[in-house]
Image (cartoon, rainbow, N blue to C red):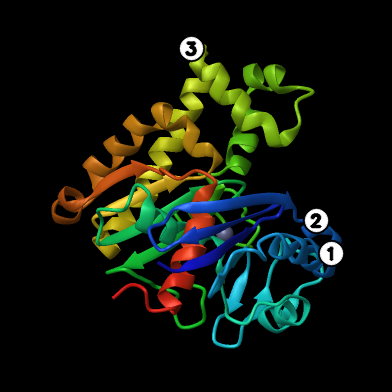
Amino acid sequence: MKNVIGIDIGGTNIRAAVVNSDGEILSRTKVKSNARDGIKSLLKNLEEVISGFSDFHADCTGIGIPGIIDQKNGVLTQAPNITGVKNFPLTKEIKQITSLKNIIVENDANAAALGEFWMGSGSESSSLLMLTLGTGLGGGIVLKGELWRGEDGMAGEIGHIIIDPSGPLCNCGNNGCFESFVSAEAVRRVVGNNNELIDYTSGIHPDDIPEKIMQLAKEGNAEAVKIWDEIGRNLGIGITSLVNLLNVDSIVIGGGLSNAWEFFENSMLGEIKKRALAGPRERLTIYPAGLGDDAGILGCAYLALKELKVFN
Ligand SMILES: [Zn+2]
């Protein structure tokens, strides 16, 4: 049995665990990442996390981070959520400040997809697409047990598939991207244009608005129910293209917004039934994510174990 460390670096927290090759978490910790204070501050917190695991003999460490990664060179090329990052030699810097020798870095959404594939809702699957519904809409593609990273580590950016060219402007500069219809940001925009719901959300922190709309839907508020119904319809439209393209057996939906599953499931499935090609549609099962916040940790551990050739 081998032990590895899986570390999931987020904009807010660093979650980390020692994981064995059966996927059991032996020890875990969580600290603030302070990503907004810059990469140096983040690395200091990371060092603290890693030194806390010094009693465990871990042969490899997998690290997931929100950004674009040049995996061959261990370089974080871009990371919009971490202040001051451009072509940052991540692996080299971590090796310098810790005792770690064997490190593998991966994009956080890709790591979460691998986690769900290994130990979560996709554990019976052969090919899987994970959608993470958070502030934006992230994705990860696992085909026959391998991540599809693309030629430049940029595959799986499904949030920027265009589903309506006349739709709202996205951060990427295009109009009508998938994530401008299906994300926390999308919920906030739609609520801001809704006279009834805007009253319910006045004074609430913008981060808490989707949660509030979930709560209102649970209480039977018709306008709130309508918002999730619309999110589901748009989700179904986006998924239709993805399943026609990839013909995966599983789609796993995670992220904070996936807690509204019961309110968007029907309209999402209805749209896919209406639009997707029969073959890919019949092969497909869609699951809510099963690992919650542990998906990233376990995906990073899986990558580390793969690096050690634990799996065939
Ligand atoms: Zn976009």
Where residue 224 sits: x, y (%)? 53, 21
Q: Above or below — where is 198 with respect to 37?
A: above
As helix, strand or loop, the secondary structure at mark 3 comes to loop
* Label drawn at residue 41: 1
Q: Above or below — where is 122 with respect to 300?
A: above
Q: Which residue is mark 3?
A: 220
Q: Amino acid at mark 2?
A: Asn
Where residue 112 sits: x, y (%)? 48, 57
Q: Above or below — where is 235 with respect to 122?
A: above
N-term-proximal mark, 1 vs 3: 1
* Label drawn at residue 285: none
Q: Amino acid at mark 3?
A: Gly
* Rendered image quadrant of residue 147: bottom left
* Residue sitting nearer the eye, 25 or 160: 25
Q: Amino acid at mark 1?
A: Ser
Q: Which residue is mark 2?
A: 34
Contact (CB < 8 A) between labels 1 and 2? Answer: yes
Q: Above or below — where is 223 with respect to 280?
A: above
Q: CA distance from mark 2 to mark 3?
A: 38 Å
As helix, strand or loop, the secondary structure at mark 2 comes to loop
**Residue at point 38%, 58% (across, down):** 22
Q: Nearer the viewer, mark 1 or mark 3?
A: 1
